[in-house]
Amino acid sequence: MDVRKLVIFITNIKEIDNAHLDIAVSLKNLYNLVSSGSDLDEQITVVRNCILKHFSIEDKSMALINYPYIEEHRQGHKLVLNTIDNITNYNEPIITILKESDVIAIYEVVLIHTEYHDNKFLEFTKIIY
Ligand SMILES: [Fe+2]
Ligand SMILES: [Fe+2]
C-alpha cells in the first residue's frame, strides 16, 4: 500500500505533520498484517488511537486561532471515525477480518479528509500568521 500522499502532505505545524506520519505508518502496518493473516485487533486499536490523538491535536490548533470552519472540520473527523469503525466492526464483539481493500478504503477516507479539510485549515493559517 502506497501511503506517500499522506506523508508528503505538510502543514508545517510539526505536531500535526508528525501525527499524519504516525497514522500512515500505523495503516501500513495494518495492511501488512492483513496480508500475513495475523490477528488484527491490536493494530486496529493502534490505528484508531493514532487517529484520535491526531484529531485532538488538530482540534486544539483550530480552537487556538478561532478557526471559523472548526465545526465543519469536526464533522469531517466524525465521518472518518465512523467510517473506520464501520469497516472494522469496532463496536461489535467479533473477531475482525479485513481485506487489503478495506485498509485501502480507510486510508482513502483519511487522505480525502486531509486533502480537503486539513488543507483548508492550512490555507487559513497562512492568512493569519
Ligand atoms: Fe489531519
Ligand atoms: Fe483534520
Image (spheres, grey):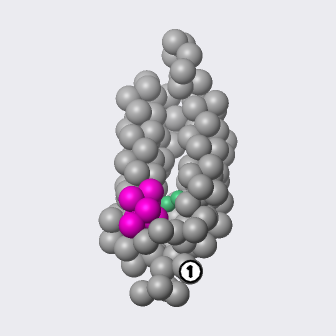
**Around disc 1, counting alpha carbons within 10 Å, would you say few (fewer than 14), some (14 to 19), or many (20 or more)?**
few
- Looking at the picture, does residue 114 appear above or below residue 28? below
Magenta range is 58-64
Q: Is residue 62 magenta?
A: yes
In this view, which residue lies farthest toward the top? Answer: 93
Q: Is residue 61 left or right of residue 105?
A: left
Q: Quadrant of the C terminus?
A: bottom left
Instruction: Tell me the kind of residue under disc 1.
Output: Glu
Name the chief secondary structure element in magenta: helix
* 26 sits to left or right of 35: left
Q: Percent x, y for residue 20?
A: 43, 60
What residue is drawn where x is 33% and y is 65%? Answer: 15
Q: Residue at x 63, y 32 (%)?
A: 87
Residue 4 showing in the rendered view: no
Identify which residue is drawn at 57% across, 68% down: 68
Residue occupied by mark 1: 123
Residue 59 x/y as whole percent: 44, 57
Report x, y in % for residue 16: 39, 65
Provide residue 126's location: percent of width, then percent of height.
49, 85
- Residue beneath the point at 33% across and 71% down: 14
Quarter residue 42 falls in: top left
